[in-house]
Image (tube, rainbow, N blue to C red):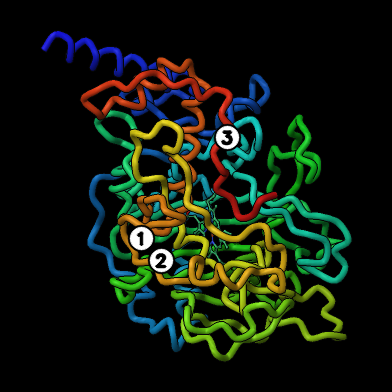
Amino acid sequence: MLGAAAAACVAASAISQERSAAAVPMPASAAAAAAPRFPSYDPRYPPPPGTPPAQVFQLSQDFPKTYAADTFAWEKIDFKAFPNEYLRAVLNYCLEGNVDVDFRVQDNPVRKWYHAPWLHDDGSQFGGGREWRRGMTRERMSRPFELHSKQTGRGQNWAVGFYNDRGGVGLGKVWLTADGRPDPAKSTFPPNTVACKLLFTDAPVEQVPYLANGKVWTANIYPDTNYNKPRVDKEMRLLQLDVAVKDPRLARSSGWVFGTFVYDGGSPGKTVWDRMSPVGLIWGDDQSVRIDAQRNGVFVNTALTQSRINGFLVEQPGWDYGNRAYVRHHGLGGRVNGPIDSPISSCVSCHGRAGTFANAADPVNRGRPMAMAVFSANKPSDFPMDKFDEFFKPIADGAHLETQDGSQFMTTDYSLQVTGGIRNYYQNLRSQPPVVAEAAGNARGARAAAPVDLSDAPPLPRVDRDAD
Ligand code: HEC
C-alpha cells in the first residue's frame, strides 16, 4: 500500500512539474487560481513586458460539463438541397456576439465559445504554436498563384478556431481528466457541436486583389515563409473561414458537415461578413468516385454525390475578375477544400484521419498522429492512386479504433485540434527529464515502466495542413 501511495505521489508531482515547465504568466482570475490552466500562447514568443492583458490572447478554457437544450437555425435546412442557406445559418451563429468582442470568445455576451488546449507549443523544430495576439497557429502556406493569377509570392497563413459550448463539453472530457493526461477515447462530440475557424494571410492585396477592404488583424508571426525567428508584428487579412457541424442527420456515417467560405472584397455585401462567399460543403468522400481524381486545376466534378460546390467561384480562364474572388483549386477530384488547403486532400479526408496512437503506454509512439494525407504529392496528378482507399474511405464519427499501416489509432471524432493537442502534449514531455516524463506518462497505469530517454528521438510528426 505504502509503495503504491508513494508511487502515486511521484506521479502527481511529476505532472505538476510538467505543467509548470510549460506554464507562462496568465492574467490572474479566480478561476485561474482554482484549477490548473492550459497555456494560451507559445512561451518562446511572449508579449513584450508591460503589454496590457486586454491585448493578449487568452485561451477560453472554462469548459462546461453540460450544455443547453438549444435549437439551431440549420437543423431545419436540408444541407444537400440548400447548401448555401445551411452555411449562412452556421456562419451567422459563429459570428453572433463574437464580432462585437472581436473574437475574444469567452467575452461573448450571447454564448461562450472555447479553444482547444495544447496548440500553444508544437516544438522548437516547427515553431507554429499559438501567437500571443490572437491565439493563431501556423497553417499551410499558399504557393505562388494558388490564390490568384497575380500572386507571385508565397503567403504565410495563420488561423484561430473555436468551439461552441457543446464542443467545449467534449474538449473538457478529453483534457480535464483525473490523472492530467488527455484521454482520446473521450473525444466524442455531442450533436450540433460547431467549430469555426478564421484563416488569415499575409499575402498583400496587390497580389490577391479580392482581399481588399477586408478584416485586418495584427498578429505576431514570422517575417516570411522561411519562418525565421524572431516573430514580428504583421498585418494579416481574412482570407478563408471554415466551419464544421456535427449534424445528427449524419449519425452513423461521417457525422459532420464541413464547409468553407472565401472572402470576396469585390462583392456588394455591406459588411466583411456579408462578403464571405461560400465555396462549398462536404459530408463524405465518395469513395467509389475515382473519375478526375488526378486532374489538376479547378473544375466541378458532377460524379460526386457527397459534396456541393459553388460553380460561380470556379475560375473562368481569360475573365477579368477585378477584385472579385474566385478559386483556382478545390480538393482531390473536385472534393471540397478551401483556397489555402492542399489540392490532394479534402476536409473530410484530412479530418477523418484525426486519430492518435492508441497504446498510450508505448513511450516511443504515444501522441503519434495518424497520417492525414499523402503530403509527398503536391498536385493531384502526383497523387498515388494505390493510396486512394486509405485516405478516402469512410470513417465513422465518434472516438473509436482504426488501423493504419498496421498500427491502431484512437480517432478523435474528426477533431484535428484534439489530435494535434495530444501530439504536442507528448512531444513536450519528451523534452522533460526522462524520469519525470516516464512517471507522468504512467500516472494512470499501476506499474511504472523503466524510464526511457526520448530527448534525442526525432520529433513526432506534426499535425498540420501540409508538410511545409
Ligand atoms: C490536409 C489537412 C486538412 C485539410 C484538408 C483541412 N483541414 Fe481543417 N484542420 C487541419 C488541422 C491540422 C487542424 C488543427 C490545427 C489548428 O487548428 O491549429 C484543423 C482544424 C480545423 C478546424 C478546427 C476544429 C477541428 O476540427 O480541429 C475546423 C473547423 C476545420 N479545420 C475545418 C476544415 C474545413 C471546413 C476544411 C475544408 C474546407 C478543412 N478543415 C480542411 C487540417 C486540415
State the separation of the CA atoms marked 2 and 3.
32 Å
SS category of the residue bearing label 2: strand
The residue beneath circle 2 is: 245
Residue 143 in view (yes/no): yes
| Mark 3 lies within 8 Å of ligand 1 (Cβ measured) | no
For disc 1, the neighbor class at 10 Å (few under 14, some 14 to 19, many from 20) is: many
Position of the N terminus, as image quadrant, is: top left
Q: Which residue is mark 3?
A: 459
The reply, left or right, for residue 311 in relation to residue 164 is right
Q: Which mark is residue 193?
A: 1
* Residue drawn where x is 29% and y is 64% of the image: 191
Q: Position of residue 274 (x, y in %)?
A: 61, 71
Q: How many numbered marks, from 0 up?
A: 3
Q: Quadrant of residue 78?
A: bottom left
Are the residues tagged 1 and 2 within 8 Å (C-beta)?
yes
- The three-letter code of the residue at mark 1 reads Thr
> Neighbour class for label 3 at 10 Å: few (<14), some, many (≥20)?
many
Q: Looking at the picture, which amino acid does disc 2 mark?
A: Val
User: Do the numbered discs 3 and 1 sit on residues whose CB atoms are within 8 Å?
Assistant: no
The x, y position of residue 223, in whole percent, is: 80, 40
The amino acid sitting under disc 3 is Pro
Question: Badges 2 and 3: C-beta atoms under 8 Å apart?
Answer: no
Cα–Cα gap, marks 1 and 2: 6 Å
The label nearer to you, 3 versus 1, is 3
Vertical placement of 171 versus 95: above or below?
above
